[in-house]
Image (cartoon, rainbow, N blue to C red):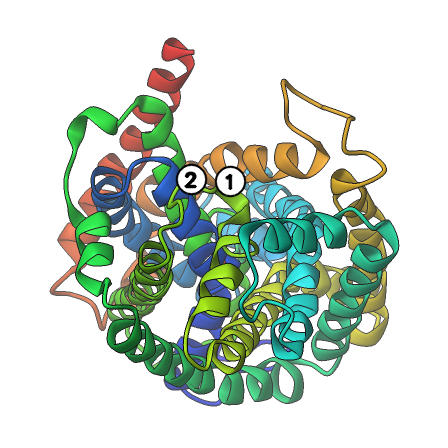
Amino acid sequence: MVRTDSIHGMWSSRLMFILAASGSAVGLGNIWRFPYVAGENGGGAFVLVYLGCIFLIGIPIMASEILLGRAGRQSPINTMRSVAIASGASSRWQIIGWMGAFAGFMILSFYAVIAGWVLSYVILLGSGVFVGADADLANDTFSGFIGNPWSVVGWFTGFMVLTVFITARGVGKGLETTVKYLMPTLFALLIILMIYAAVTSGHFIEGVVFLFSFELEKLTWDSVLIAMGQAFFTLSLGMGAIMAYGAYMPKSASIIGTATTIALMDTGVALMSGLVIFPLVFANGLESSAGPGLMFVTLPLAFGQMASGQFFGCVFFILVAFAAITSAISLVEPAVAWIVERLKTTRVVAALLVGTLVWLLGLGSAFSTNVLSDFYIVGEMTFLDTIDYVTNNIVLPLGGIFIALFAGWVLDSKILDEEMKRDLFYFPAWRFLTRFMAPVAVAIVFVMTILQN
Ligand code: PFF
């Protein structure tokens, strides 16, 4: 069952796979979500739990996803089916692929709405409305924008069109070309912005202290669950995105080494984003725990007070838009690849189909901040909040447990040996973490969160 290529196309090198997978991993999760959840959950101790989850749970599961994808060389649904059958196990394991494709729909439906906010903020920051603005103006601008269903839906639609367009062009011309240019640009912009924050804010050290000072008493099981969910979300794990990308990875590349590289890049971007955002926030005496509005209200306000803030603020939102688009294309890949295989149709048709369905579902999130803002699903959570909470904190970790159990216990040893032959040194550690650590840790966090609530 050793296939050397996929009908969907292949990455032209290991580097391209790394750029694509880190393009998937680095996204709104790093730049928008990480700083605000770290801020809401007290900083340092939360960050430490998050880092623990990345290294002890995230990397082994990422390696498992790449391994399974490369062994199956198809969409996650068909990959899981054929790898399970080849391992003498039930073809029902394909449910992992189904859950993943479904999670991809749900995540992209709100992800693209937020990405739409980002696109509009590129223009807003560039236009200079925030120069010298006070808190009221920054708040009013944000609530005015998200409160207007037309503009939110318009930008959301624009972002979806872009996603469908890139996806339809295929693995080589669409996905690879996009990540090849956007990812290096993104890294360069982030470094420039960090230097800018360090040099101009005068509060860089405060940002560092906030991100790394360890205050155990701020940690609850709920925040541990959120840290774990964030680790899955930020590494794009538990839903087959990395498995789909793994299917296009050359045979010669090592798996654990590659997974570790991707995780390190992703973590680096999250921490650097924190080191851009918090120094600016502290320099202007603003709140670090502002929630989802941190990037859209607090940060523009901070840029508005800084020298050359109009320019750098605009650059910052361009960077976020790049990060979002390279993640969005990975969210649809599992479903698109499956439709191509199943309906024997072209990627254009598959991408349009998936894009339309995601768009319809996304209207619920687009309206969550305006016409449906008083419509709560659970507690005080709107449609958008509910999908975000459920997918990150429940669906992805659950998918991750199953992937780890399958790769650790069920996968045929011949397939495993073949895929892992370049990773012999780290193999025992991977095996231990995948078999025991990842499933047990996720299960404990689930149980403790339920008990505590
Ligand atoms: N990892 C992306 C981020 O941090 O923004 C989000 C994401 C992409 C999650 C792809 C899941 C996924 F499959």
User: What residue appears at the point 56 percent right and 57 percent down from the top-left corner?
Assistant: 79
Q: How many residues crowd around disc 2 within 10 Å: few (fewer than 14), some, or many (20 or more)?
A: many
Residue annotated with mark 2? 229
Q: Where is residue 197 in the image (x, y as percent from the top left)?
A: 32, 72
User: What residue appears at the point 35 percent right and 83 percent down from the top-left corner?
Assistant: 192
Q: What element carries label 1?
A: helix
Q: Which amino acid does label 1 sit on?
A: Asn
Whether tag 2 and tag 1 are in contact, CB under 8 A, the answer is yes
Total numbered labels: 2
Toward the viewer: 193 or 56? 193
Compared to 367, does 442 lie above or below? Answer: above
Mark 1 C-beta closer than 8 Å to ligand 1:
no
**CA–CA distance between discs 2 and 1?**
5 Å
Q: What element carries label 2?
A: helix
Compared across the picture, whether 381 is left or right of 198 comes to right
Q: In which quarter of the image is residue 173?
A: bottom right
> Does any portion of residue 34 appear in the rendered image?
yes
Indicate which disc residue 76 carries.
none
Q: How many residues crowd around disc 1 within 10 Å: few (fewer than 14), some, or many (20 or more)?
A: many
Compared across the picture, whether 128 is left or right of 342 comes to left
Q: Position of residue 132 (x, y in %)?
A: 53, 67
Toward the viewer: 273 or 51? 273
> Does any portion of residue 405 appear in the rendered image?
no
Residue annotated with mark 1? 392
Toward the viewer: 118 or 310? 310
User: What residue appears at the point 81 percent right and 43 percent down from the top-left corner?
Assistant: 367
Q: Earlier in the sequence, mark 2 or mark 1?
A: 2
Location of the C terminus by quadrant is top left
Q: What residue type is labelled 2?
A: Gly
Compared to 1, does 228 lie above or below? Answer: above
Q: Where is residue 137 in the image (x, y as percent from the top left)?
A: 63, 55
